[in-house]
Image (cartoon, rainbow, N blue to C red):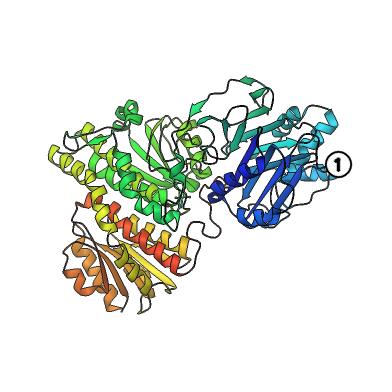
Amino acid sequence: MCGIVGYIGDKRAYPILIKGLSRLEYRGYDSAGVALLEPGEDIKVYKRQGKVIDLTEFVNGSSTSGTIGIGHTRWATHGLPNDVNAHPHSSGDGKITLVHNGIIENYAILKKELVNRGRVFKSETDTEVLVHLIEDVKSKSGVSLVEAVRIALNRVHGAYAIVVISSDDPNKIIAAKKSSPLVIGMGEDEYYLASDATPIVEYTKNVVYLEDEQIAIIDRHNGLRIISIGNQEVSPYVQELEMQLEELEKGGYEHFMLKEIYEQPHAIKDSFRGRLNAKEGWVSLGGIKDYEEQIAKSDRIIIIACGTSWHAALVAEYYFEDLARIPVEVEYASEFRYRNPIIRKNDVVIAISQSGETADTLAALKMAKEQGATLIGIVNVVGSTISRVTDAGSYTHAGPEIGVASTKAFTTQLVLLAMMALSLGKRRGTITDEKFSLLLNELEALPMKIEKLLESDSYIKGVSAIYKDARNALYLGRGTSFPIALEGALKLKEISYIHAEGYPAAEMKHGPIALIDENMPVFVIATQGENYVKVVSNIQEVKARKGKLIAIVTKGDTTVREMADHVIEIPMSHEFVVPILATIPFQLISYHIAVMRNCNVDQPRNLAKSVTVE
Ligand code: F6R
């Protein structure tokens, strides 16, 4: 949460910072700000409540000179999202300015101490403590800015990625991180800094991912140097980015979310590439190959995740237990990390995360590591923190997901977990050759089936229009379709602000049935398979209470069609892949309803794509 950028070089920093902030806006969009520095001049700070566009309107007409700059787009944690609390924050004398992503947990104690020493605070943020602390250390001890940053960070508890500039040191940028991400792009005599690589990719593909408790000192004349906060020299490890610039544009779609929904056939193909071949009868995940034997022999798999990724974990529980016969526990990372769980050496902990930066998932992983578990990551963002702290892992390869609501990242998580379960099942001998081959074929056919399904989009839009004014909605499914009901409900509530609940269809009669009347849309997954007859009974229970029924059915279904108000057909498929296919209509319904309700689909209120605070 919160996006930070920085630039030092020969170019004007302002346009680079603004473009970078727009790319990072998915991380927070309560307020935005920049600070610009030209040697010999004072630092210019512009900040504004609202989005990056509001900041540019505010700045319009003011001086934006400066070849050094830092910028920030905020998701408020401490203090209201107003102009004063917006970053950057400056020291009392205005000479030091910084941006911060994270939370300073001991800010209250530090603030008290600094106030007692006469420092005057302007904002309610935890961040402002940092800049006053750096100023305080510097003026008291007469040390360099770098040393002051280092000493200050040693006093701080919590998470931070910071970028600092000073008019007394006008040819330098100092950056540091702990638990919040920071990437440094290495250009020709110029450097870019950002919370992720998206603002950097169009300038350079050479990047350094700063590690926890490292400080980067970037000097216009002497280049990049990295030290630890314990003052040890570190050699920068330069990596090459794989990301393409076009992946970050809307490509003719009205919203990123719609583009990302439509990208799913392609994204899933990318997820399969080099990993699955149904004709030759193999599946192989290179990233976890060396650990597969250990996973196959583990006593238990614990899957930790948050939000949509947690829904993928719930589907994986069915996959792993059914196909590989390994016991699985699925946990919200935020609960797992705080409840003193029993973790044994022979447990494998799998973390699922689109961003690879979710604070709770990361903290839960660290805890599991301390207790000796093997850590596996299923991550989308290449080079992200979770991909680096795990022992091994596989990337979903969905490409950058910009819309805050997760779509293609979710379906590629599902296909990856399905491949993993098949591979483990094969290794453990818990799946027959016939079933293995059948399911490989089912997976491989998915991109083509999703293409087909997307052809129903205008019909789905028509159905969505009927329910756009609903105040509540219920989503039902059984088996692997239950997590998809949860995901459908989450998607609707997060982007259209309609209250929605997902339930296992049979649980409905233990409470939620009381809510059903002629105003309640009930979305149900009623595809052919083991649970079909049971779901049909649940549908009858809904109809008997006059609920409005929107059913996802297998192509050609007539039974449910007679009972439902609307049916959305998915191609005939094995139950194994139904969760992936059934997700698509729910994504489209949420998208269309949100657009019809004039909601900001790509940047829903109060949300951020990368949840880097607890
Ligand atoms: C919902 C959504 C969130 C994320 C959750 C975890 O559409 O995107 O619920 O799934 O914040 O994020 P990651 O997967 O990045 O760990």
419 versus 84 height, above or below: above
Q: Residue at x 51, y 59 (%)?
A: 604
Q: Is residue 210 visible?
A: no
**Residue 96 percent location from the top left of the image:** 77, 38
Residues packed near mark 1 inside 10 Å, few (<14), some (14 to 19) or many (20 plus) = few
The amino acid type, in three-letter code, at marker 1 is Arg
**Residue 353 percent location from the top left of the image:** 44, 43
Q: Residue most toward the right? A: 118
Secondary structure at badge 1 equals loop
Which of 211/351 is in front?
A: 211
What is the quadrant of residue 486 in the picture? bottom left
Q: Is residue 180 left or right of residue 86?
A: left
99 versus 530 height, above or below: above
Q: Is residue 417 left or right of residue 279?
A: right
Q: Residue most toward the left? A: 434
Q: Is residue 123 visible?
A: yes
Which of 562/204 is in front?
A: 204
Q: Residue at x 23, y 31 (%)?
A: 427
Residue wearing tag 1: 117
**Residue 224 percent location from the top left of the image:** 63, 25
Q: Is residue 133 left or right of residue 229?
A: right
Q: Is residue 154 left or right of residue 440?
A: right
Count of numbered marks: 1
Ligand 1 contact, mark 1 (Cβ < 8 Å) = no
295 versus 538 height, above or below: above
What is the quadrant of residue 474 in the picture? bottom left
What is the quadrant of residue 287 in the picture? top left
